[in-house]
Image (tube, rainbow, N blue to C red):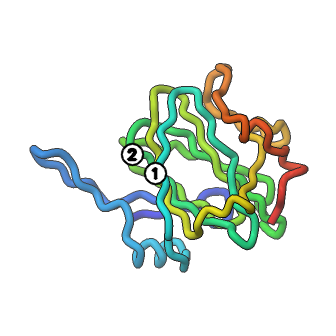
Amino acid sequence: MKVTKTEIEGVVVVEPGRAFEDERGTFCETFREREFAELTGFAGRFVQENESRSREGVVRGLHFQKEPNAQAKLVRVVSGRILDVAVDMRRSSGTFGKWVMVELSEENKKQLFIPRGCAHGFSVPRGEAVVVYKVDGYWAPEDDAGVRWDDEALGIDWGLGGEKAVVSKKDAALPGFEEAYKF
């Protein structure tokens, strides 16, 4: 397993070890708790895993849970390709208000670890994508929160080439960065 730091403190790209191929297909170990903890410093445990399937042009996010139910996430793509985004919502962080984008795909097998205190979202620039992510806390609807995906203060280019994004009513109604909950 290989871990690469991003510009945001605690947000890292995780690349699994090599994939084994034979006449049946491939095998790749995508997560090993002890090694993950050693490489990232993450001492928590993942308690829930979620999966979404999204079509071309979809933007999901930017989501997080407020304290006391904040969640860390480990995101990967099973099928297709996404542009995965983390936004630092931690006032005490040196990268507060900044964002990073990483391409995750079934081919590159990269994963993105997003610590508590960061918002998360992704876009599907083309085709369809199946995304799986682990979280270290259970979903708590009373603490569900987020930031508008298209907030000009953030200026995220979701890679849709000027096409109209497909977003949920809930995501379209999220507050901008200035009004959003901060950690």
Q: Secondary structure at mark 2?
A: strand
x and y percent of residue 145 in the render? 75, 54
Picture layout, residue 13 above or below residue 67: above
SS at mark 1 in the image: strand
Q: Measured from the top left, where is residue 38 in percent x and y?
A: 47, 78
**Residue 118 visible in the current orientation:** no
Label 1, residues with CA under 10 Å away: few <14, some 14-19, many ≥20: some
Farthest-out residue, top: 163
Q: Position of residue 3 (x, y in %)?
A: 48, 63
Q: Amino acid at mark 2?
A: Val
Q: Is residue 145 visible?
A: yes
Specify the amino acid type for callout 1: Val
**Tag 1 residue:** 132
| Figure quadrant of residue 157 | top right
Q: Upstream in the sequence, badge 1 or badge 2?
A: 2
Q: Quickly name the residue at label 2.
A: 78
- The residue lying toward the viewer, choosing from 93 and 173, is 173
